[in-house]
Amino acid sequence: MLRFTRLTGLLAVASLVVPLGVSTTSSARTVPQPCVISLSPTATETLFALGAGPDVKAVDTDSNYPTVGLPHLKINAFSPSVEGVLGACGAKGVKPSLVVISYDANSIAEKLRAVGVRVLNQSAPSTLSGAYSQIEALGAALGRTRQAAALVASMSTSITASLASVPHVRGRSPRIYYELDPTLYSVTSSTFVGSILKRMGTVNIADPKNTSADAGYPQLNAEYVVAANPQIIFLADTVCCHASPASVAHRAGFSRVAAVTDGHVVALNDDVASRWGPRLTELVAQLAHAVRAALTDSRLWTKSLG
């Protein structure tokens, strides 16, 4: 599991949880309303799912969900500046109450902390429990622990059901190829998505090609993929690169691949496939559906490899 910072800084006064931005003095005065900046598309989705959308004043340029309610102010998460982040709250002198990142570009976390800004770094997890823990940590940072617990419980129930829906059929372990882009970068079973597919009983054709330098994301070549003859192909590059079952079928040699000839090329939404927030339930459900379909397709199990 990748390391991440789990914040548990819940402020309590008279046994009450005090959300970010609320004064703890007996005076009627309150500090400015919370100003949360999200430089992570996954965190943006989670923030809105937790009901903190109105507190989000700026997001990164890749945040595009939910489709309504996102702030107009966008910040490039791959080249952020301290000045840009500090100025996102609108009022002069008002600092963000929380900045969430998934990539520490320009050492932005250290620079923001140096000027007193709270930063939560949530890089990509390697397990489902890691994804759930990040949601709980974000809920704790916002004073929304109950909402976070409810979201995790709902996600866990859905994902557990999807995993359980895939039967273990003796002698049938579908070979899968998961495509990240048209240059044939893929994922192995050591990655977040790869580990989920492994739990469904699949055999990942990228696993033998993994090296320590690849960090679980090796680049394959067309000849290797064709020779491995995957029975399911997942396309996580349909939006960015317009990959489709039809375009895959037109690649040299792919017309002989079982996934192509028997109709098991699965088009995924790039965004859903690359994030680990609330919509993870949709991805796991789609993966499970595809594996179930392959397990019950007798054509895949009456052909010899190659």
Image (spheres, rainbow, N blue to C red):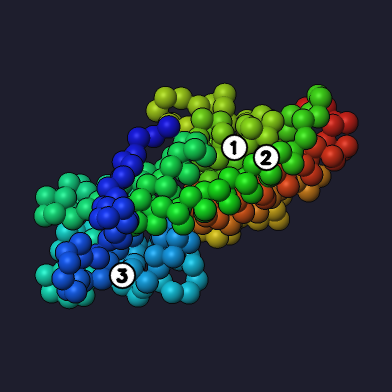
Q: Which residue is mark 3?
A: 57
- Direction from residue 229 to residue 210 in the image, left or right: left
Residue in front for this viewpoint, 93 or 34: 34
**Residue 304 appears in the rendering:** yes
**Residue under the image location 45 percent in, 54 percent down:** 146
For marks 1 and 2 on the same chain, the one whose residue lies earlier in the sequence: 2
Q: Residue 155, percent across and down?
A: 57, 50
Toward which corner of the image does residue 197 lie, by quadrant?
A: top right
Mark 1 or 3: the one toward you = 3
**Image quarter in which the N terminus is found:** top left
Q: Which mark is residue 196?
A: 1
Q: Which residue is mark 2?
A: 163
- Identified by mark 1, the residue type is Ile
For marks 1 and 3 on the same chain, the one whose residue lies earlier in the sequence: 3
Kindly indicate whether the residue at mark 3 contacts the one at mark 1 (C-beta within 8 angstroms). Answer: no
Residue 75 sits above or below residue 286 on the image: below
**Image quarter in which the C terminus is found:** top right
Q: Secondary structure at mark 2?
A: helix
- Direction from residue 185 to residue 234 in the image, left or right: right
- Identified by mark 3, the residue type is Lys
For marks 3 and 2 on the same chain, the one whose residue lies earlier in the sequence: 3
- Identified by mark 2, the residue type is Leu
- Direction from residue 14 to residue 301 in the image, left or right: right
Measured in 3D between alpha carbons, the distance from the residue under mark 1 to the one under mark 3, in whole angstroms, is: 34 Å
Q: Residue 11, percent across and down?
A: 26, 52
Residue in front for this viewpoint, 2 or 260: 2
**Residue 76 appears in the rendering:** no
Measured in 3D between alpha carbons, the distance from the residue under mark 1 to the one under mark 2, in whole angstroms, is: 8 Å
